[in-house]
Image (spheres, rainbow, N blue to C red):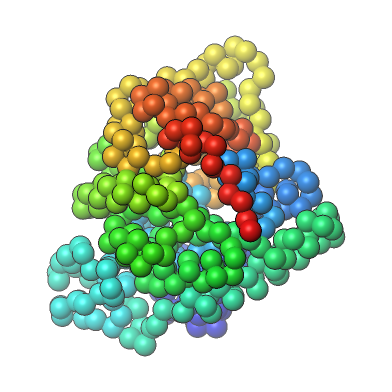
């Protein structure tokens, strides 16, 4: 194993050079590590907000103040999928700690495995070899994690002090919202309910983003009455085949688990805020043809700089260029997504383009800048989806290339979250 000296994080990293390099990259990219398996990172939009240069789509859609938002995770480097469009810095699938046995402390591959509560649904073949956690590994408690996250957020925000609006800088030191979505799959953390509850005790709202592959954990949150302020599920693909390709998995049980989560979401959504989040990629899950390479190469470097800074990406100004990237959504793709929306009946659906940054730029992912949808294409996709589902187009955030659909007028009118 890697040395245990940097935040305890080395306990859950496989003994490979690449993982070690990945860890160092996380630190260089501004991740503040907390305990053995958690982290916080200041969003680029937080800096923009502090300089009064704009706010993120969560502010436009739900009223969340970007400079008072804590972007965090209790499951750093643990994920059940390896989505090709994911910008997070995660080990690639060939180097990933397998998630099921990684949660089982100190067991032998040949011995019966007794996982933590709710995490043992999928069977594990005894013939397969797994990376194990140390026998003395214990998950950090929720209170300790939150103390570390908030302390880390203050340290990260303090770096903006010299350039920030003074009033907003003071507010940023007292965050009001937690976006549990930074990296990894948060439902793997067995004390997630306590974490959410602890945030709420501190008068903070919470958004939880899950890929839906562990439905039993969602049921547990519901049963314990510890749901987040808004529960997100990532809608990765229109059908099972595309899902397996996009998520880079051969395990069809994960797709079934995801569909089960959508059914759970339908029940939760009767009286609680729910959302589906889409990340659309040309040639992969958007049902659109790829843009001609010359369309975007003239501004690719400028776009990358803007994206990493959280600023708007430039759209082609020439009308003939826009014509070459006109929306070409396939109806069967829209139908697949519409069926999932009908199954889950979420309050909100976020139709968003993939962004070519971070981990998504890795050569093994097979993606390129031209796989991003133009804002006009996102609008067209959202329009077709709205027509198919009866949802309402309520808002958009062009810098993030995202459009918000609402289930009905009540959801649209009540989308802004008001803090006490």
**Residue farthest along the top direction in this orientation:** 320
Q: Is residue 213 left or right of residue 326?
A: left
Q: Is residue 296 left or right of residue 259?
A: right
Q: Which one is in front, 51 or 105?
A: 51
Residue at x-position 41% and y-position 78%: 139
The mark total stands at 0
Residue at x-position 41% and y-position 65%: 226
Q: Which one is in front, 258 or 126?
A: 258
Q: Is residue 354 left or right of residue 242?
A: right
Residue at x-position 14% and y-position 71%: 126
> Relative to residue 303, is residue 225 depicted above or below?
below
Regarding residue 186, the answer to whether it shows in the image is yes
> Relative to residue 110, is residue 163 depicted above or below?
above
The image position of residue 75, as x and y in percent, is: 44, 67
The image position of residue 48, as x and y in percent, is: 73, 48
> Relative to residue 102, is residue 409 depicted above or below?
above
Residue 287, quarter of picture:
top left
Q: Is residue 298 left or right of residue 414?
A: right
**Residue farthest along the bottom direction in this orientation:** 136
* Quarter of the image that includes the C terminus: bottom right
* Quarter of the image that includes the N terminus: bottom left
Residue at x-position 34% and y-position 37%: 341
Residue 395, quarter of picture:
top right
Regarding residue 188, the answer to whether it shows in the image is no
The image position of residue 235, as x and y in percent, is: 37, 43
The image position of residue 229, as x and y in percent, is: 49, 56
Residue 349, quarter of picture:
top left
């Amino acid at each position: 194993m890697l040395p245990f000296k940097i935040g305890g994080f080395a306990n859950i990293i496989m003994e490979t050079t690449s993982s070690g390099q990945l860890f160092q990259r996380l630190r260089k990219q501004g991740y503040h590590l907390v305990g053995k398996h958690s982290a916080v990172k200041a969003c680029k939009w937080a800096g923009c907000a502090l300089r009064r240069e704009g706010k993120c789509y969560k502010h436009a859609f739900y009223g969340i103040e970007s400079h008072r938002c804590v972007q965090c995770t209790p499951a750093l480097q643990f994920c059940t999928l390896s989505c090709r469009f994911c910008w997070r810095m995660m080990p690639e699938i060939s180097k990933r700690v397998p998630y099921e046995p990684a949660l089982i402390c100190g067991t032998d591959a040949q011995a019966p495995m007794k996982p933590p509560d709710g995490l043992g649904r999928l069977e594990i073949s005894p013939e397969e070899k797994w990376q194990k956690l140390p026998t003395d590994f214990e998950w950090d408690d929720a209170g300790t994690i939150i103390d570390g996250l908030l302390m880390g957020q203050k340290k990260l925000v303090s770096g903006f002090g010299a350039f920030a609006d003074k009033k907003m800088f003071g507010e940023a030191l007292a965050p009001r919202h937690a976006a549990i979505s930074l990296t990894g799959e948060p439902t793997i953390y067995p004390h997630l309910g306590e974490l959410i509850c602890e945030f709420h005790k501190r008068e903070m709202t919470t958004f939880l983003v899950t890929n839906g592959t562990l439905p039993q954990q969602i049921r547990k949150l519901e049963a314990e009455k510890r749901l987040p302020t808004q529960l997100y599920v990532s809608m990765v693909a229109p059908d099972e085949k595309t899902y397996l390709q996009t998520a880079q998995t051969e395990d069809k049980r994960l797709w079934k688990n995801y569909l089960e989560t959508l059914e759970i979401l339908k029940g939760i959504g009767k009286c609680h805020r729910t959302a589906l989040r889409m990340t659309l990629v040309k040639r992969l899950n958007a049902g659109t043809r790829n843009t001609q390479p010359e369309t975007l190469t003239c501004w690719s470097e400028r776009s990358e700089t803007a994206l990493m800074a959280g600023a708007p990406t430039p759209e082609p100004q020439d009308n003939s260029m826009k014509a070459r990237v006109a929306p070409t959504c396939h109806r069967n793709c829209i139908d697949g997504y519409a069926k999932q929306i009908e199954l889950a009946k979420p309050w909100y659906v976020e139709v968003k383009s993939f962004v070519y940054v971070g981990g998504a730029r890795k050569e093994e992912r097979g993606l390129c800048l031209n796989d991003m949808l133009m804002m006009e294409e996102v609008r067209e996709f959202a329009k077709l989806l709205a027509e198919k589902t009866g949802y309402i187009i309520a808002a958009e955030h062009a810098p993030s290339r995202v459009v918000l659909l609402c289930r009905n007028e009540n959801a649209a009118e009540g989308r802004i979250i008001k803090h006490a």
